[in-house]
Structure formats: C-alpha cells, structure tokens
Image (spheres, rainbow, N blue to C red):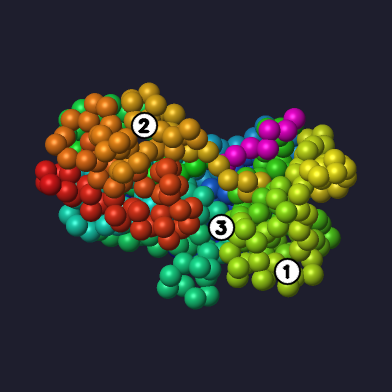
Amino acid sequence: MAREKGDCLAQAEQMTPTPQAEHLDVIRILGKAGGPMGYMIRDFLHRSDVPFEWIELHSEEEARTKAGVSGLNDSRLPVCIFPDGTRLECPTIRQIIEKLGWFHDPSRSEYEVAIYGAGPAGLSAAVYAASEGLATIVVERSAVGGQAGSSSRIENYLGFPRGISGAELAERAREQACRFGAEILVGREGIRGEFLPGKGVGYLADGTKIVARSTICATGIEYRRLGLAGEEKFLGAGVYYGAGASEAALCHGNEDVFIAGGGNSAGQAAMHFSRVARTVNMVLRGPSLKDTISQYLLDRILSFNNVRVMTDSEVSGLEGDETLEAISITNRLTGDCRRFATRWLFVCIGGDPRTTWAAEVGILRDEAGYLMTGPDLLRNHQRPPGWSLDRDPYYLETNMPGVFAAGDVRHGSVKRCASAVGEGAMAVTFVHRYLTGG
C-alpha cells in the first residue's frame, strides 16, 4: 500500500509482475506482447518498486473485452488501470508519475546543494547532505536507482549477504534521503547549466530552474547501443538495454534468451533468466569471462547447465517484422555467422557518460566524455585554465569551483555500486569544505 511522505516518492511493497497475479491493490497494465510502450511502463514501475500486474492481450476479442479498445493495434494500448479505477490510455511516464503523486516543483528558491542523478552515487550524496543539514534537492530524469535499479540482484554489496535487488536498494536509499529532508524530483531532465561564483543554475526541460550554491553531477551513463540496422525498431520489442529484471516473469520455459556483454550486470542477468528460460546465451567479444566478471558470478554461471558462453563473438544482425524474431551472431576470429531464433536480446555492453551539457559550459572531460576531477585536472602541477581559487581542486571537484562529480560519470571511477555510494558520500564532504570556504 502506497504512503506519501512529503516530497518523497510513494513507498510500495514489491510485487513480481506476472500475468497470473491476482487483482490486488496494484496497477494493472493491459497490452500486447512486444509493445515498446508496455515495456517502458513495466521497466519504470519495476525500477520504482511499485507493484503492478501485466495482462498480455492475445487476440482482438481480448483487446475489446479486457482493455475496452478496438483491437490489438489500437493506438490506445497499453491501458493502465490504477487501484482507484482511474484509466490511462497509452500514458507517458510523466503522466504515470503525476498520477502517482510524485510530480512536484521545488519548494525552495535556492538550495545549498543540487544533485543531478538518483543512482547509487546521487542517492548516497542526498542521504549525507540532507542528514548534515544541507538544503538538498535531487533531479532524476527517469526512475530512482539509475542503472543499478534494473539489476535483479546485487550480491557483493556490503551488509546484504543474501543479496538485494537494485530496485529495493534504491527504494531504501530514497526513503532514507527523504527522511532527512532531501527533495527528489522524478521525471525531470536537466538540459543545461550556468555556473557563477558561489551559485549554479540548472535548467530543466520543462522550464524549471534549480538554483544552488553547489552541484554534484551523478548522472551516470547511457546504455551503449549495438549500432545495428533495426535496433531502434526493436527497442522494447525484443531488444532491451540493461539487465531487464522487469521482463523475466514474461519469459517462458521454452525460450532462448541472449545477452550481449560479459560484465557483472550481464552475469546477473544470466543468472536471473536461467531460472525461467530454456537456455541463456552470453555473447562475449573477448576470449573469456575471467577478466570481466566477479569470481562468484563466474563460478555460478559455469555451474548452470542452461547457461552458455559464446566467446570471441558479437551480435551482428537483427530480424523480425513488428517484434524481434531472430539474431545473427558472428565469430570475430573465423568470420562464421550463425542465425538464432529468439525474441529476447538484452544488451549489457557498458555505456557512455551523459555529459554533453558539461562541454557547453566549459567543464573539462576526457576523450570518452567522462568528467575530469581533482588531481586529474593538474598538468605539470599547474591548476586548470581559468581556475579562480587559491587552492587546488578538491578530489571530486571539476574545473568549475563548486561543481563536483561522483559515480560512473567521473573519469577514473570504479564501475561498482559500492564505489558509487562511497563517492557520493565523499562528494558531500568536499561540498562542505567549499561552502565554508575551506
């Protein structure tokens, strides 16, 4: 049962989405298989730890009788029915956020710290900043939790010996930050910024302005695409980015799942789908999993009979009409190409940082677009050009005084959940020093 806490998101008991779920106090989503909008809604609700039931429509008659639309190709699908009876037809994520009561404007004209991104780094920064009395606001373009929120299970995070889902960890962190007084704006995207001495202004896509004395950028990375013909067409209709935890309940035991990538997120996805799919096939560009995955995951993957690892290979083609029907996989050593029938391809090949805005305001980035901070800004012991303070940049500070970076978006960061949490907390320490003139 959802309950509101001021500026916080609604708290909800987690429920696994399944077509066989009973009609409890959950959001019901009615749509056809392979619909990209249906996937976007399921993914958002799952990552937001909101209970829902997915009802898949298989015929024109079911579309008419269950969803109240003319047929499976009706533009009003998917239909969302909320516990209070409210019906939204083909809703946007923004409309769902508004219906859940999560959409609001900033309560202050100015904050001491503005945090962009509500993944592990941003949520950690919010907890520590708000708990220490700083007026704190967090801006998140999508769902709280970032990419970690889509993970089916995080098993190497300190204090959770049996593991915890990314969505649950994010929800706990969100509630903790809100208890200390942090404000979290969900479904709001920052598009540009202006940074003056002692004050930064972030402009959101809807025209809202966020004014703050300091800024922490924790925007993470954008999933990297395969770059194949038809990729956009199949997004949410057979091709998914990330671990795809929201989709496991829809995969049947006679299906073959393919995962492109060999990192920990790909490994967790393989373990998750191995419980419901006939086979799970990991497609690696390299010769082995040993160099890219944690040992505990490697041991488990090798112990499962239905998990296969295809080394020195890459996905080279996508086939299908409205939904994905088959993929091609090419061996990078021999050039041999094989075709596999499937309607499930999960892409976990890393990502690129969301830092276009930084280049526009003069914040330094490395060749890959990651934000440069601290010692990495010094060249021959010289401070970066234009640096206006009589001290070196703090460890997580960019070349713009008072603007900090934490987590995956930062040059040289360790791409692990625990590392992001640590950097978020550390960034607040430097924010304090900056605000007090230390």
Nearest the eye: 340 or 301: 301
**According to the image, label 3 marks what residue?**
151
> Which image quadrant is residue 220 in?
top left
Residue type at numbered disc 2? Leu
Return the residue nearer the eye: 413 or 391: 391
Asked if labels 3 and 2 touch by Cβ distance under 8 angstroms, the answer is no
Which badge, 2 or 1, comes first in the chain's sequence?
1
Of marks 3 and 1, which one's residue comes earlier in the chain?
A: 3
Give the quadrant of residue 377: top left
Q: Was residue 226 drawn as part of the magenta stretch in this picture?
A: yes
Image coords of residue 278 (percent x, y): 81, 62
Q: What is the number of the mark on residue 55?
A: none
**Is residue 430 shown left or right of residue 103?**
left
Residue 374 visible in the displayed image: yes
Label disc, if present, on residue 364 of the rendered structure? 2
Judging depth in this view, the residue of 201 and 41 nearest the camera is: 201
Helix, strand, or loop for circle 2? loop
Please identify the residue farthest to the front as the structure is shown: 380
- Residue drawn 19% across and 57% down? 132
Q: Mark 2 or mark 3: which comes first in sequence?
A: 3
Looking at the image, residue 294 sits to the left or right of residue 416; the answer is right
Instruction: Please identify, in this view, whether the residue under mark 2 or under mark 3 is nearer the observer.
Output: 2
Q: Give the image location of residue 386, x and y in percent.
A: 24, 26
Q: Nearer the viewer, residue 60 or 370?
A: 370
x 34%, y 30%: residue: 363
Tell me how far mark 2 sits from mark 3, CA to CA: 31 Å
Dot 2 alpha-carbon crowd within 10 angstroms: few under 14, some 14 to 19, many 20 or more: many
Gap in Å between the C-alphas at discs 2 and 1?
A: 42 Å
- What residue is at 68 percent from the left and 33 percent from the top? 227
Q: Residue under label 1, please give it.
A: 302
Q: Residues within 10 Å of mark 3 (few under 14, many from 20)?
A: many
Which mark is nearer the camera, 3 or 1? 1
